[in-house]
Amino acid sequence: MFRDYRESDFESVWTLDQECFPPGIAYSRSELRAFLSGKTAETIVVERDGRIVAFVLGRRRGRTDAEVITLDVTASARREGLGRRLMVELERRFRAAGVPRVTLEAAATNAIAIRFYESLGYRTVAPLPSYYGPGRHAWRMEKALVSSPG
């Protein structure tokens, strides 16, 4: 079941983030709580049998763009299309809010994630040297949500 995040979900989504990402990339409790409670945060969870198995967290930044903060899918639920469906819904919400562009960051070593985002129409726009700490590089990726005229 896809649904909006509730504050009572915090421990489950934090635990899932720790499962999905290594130290230094996974968010601390305070970082994740700050993102989730932001005024423009959009968080969608997938719940199965009372357990959160996936979620996406994004936020609008002004009227011109939005960003995907994290997309997390538990190992046992991967390759089922949940990540794709979560991203499509998040983008739909951003588009409905009039946001023309969305960005995200992906670890330069995470070829699977980069290919996944490319399959959704994202393109690599800038290197982010040492984004995750010394020697841990990332790529900024971007997708236009509305077609430009002409």
Image (cartoon, rainbow, N blue to C red):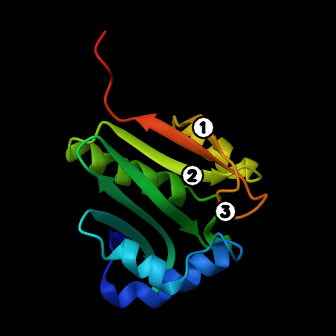
Q: State the image coordinates of residue 132 (x, y, percent, origin top left).
A: 67, 62
Work out whether residue 71 or residue 124 is closer to the camera in this orientation and state it. 124
- Quarter of the image where one finds residue 22: bottom right
Question: Which mark is in front, 2 or 3?
Answer: 3
Name the N-terminal-most of marks 1 and 3: 1
Does residue 87 sit above or below 20 in this rendering?
above
Q: Which residue is mark 3?
A: 132
Would residue 98 be found to the left or right of residue 73 on screen?
Answer: left
Q: Residues within 10 Å of mark 3 (few under 14, many from 20)?
A: some
Q: Which residue is mark 2?
A: 105
Question: Which mark is in front, 1 or 2?
Answer: 1
Q: Residue at x 55, y 41 (%)?
A: 141
**Amino acid type assigned to the residue bearing label 1 in the image:** Ala
Alpha carbon of mark 2 to alpha carbon of mark 3: how far? 10 Å
Q: Which mark is residue 103?
A: none
Q: Residues within 10 Å of mark 2 (few under 14, many from 20)?
A: many
Q: Residue at x 39, y 86 (%)?
A: 9
Name the N-terminal-most of marks 2 and 3: 2
Name the N-terminal-most of marks 1 and 2: 2
On the question of residue 50 being in view, the answer is no
Q: Which residue is mark 1?
A: 126
Work out whether residue 136 or residue 113 is closer to the camera in this orientation and state it. 136
> Tags 1 and 2 in contact by the CB under 8 Å rule?
no
Q: State the image coordinates of residue 32 (x, y, percent, origin top left).
A: 46, 77
Mark 1 falls on what kind of element? strand
Alpha carbon of mark 1 to alpha carbon of mark 2: how far? 10 Å
Q: Residue at x 55, y 82 (%)?
A: 28
**Amino acid type assigned to the residue bearing label 3 in the image:** Tyr
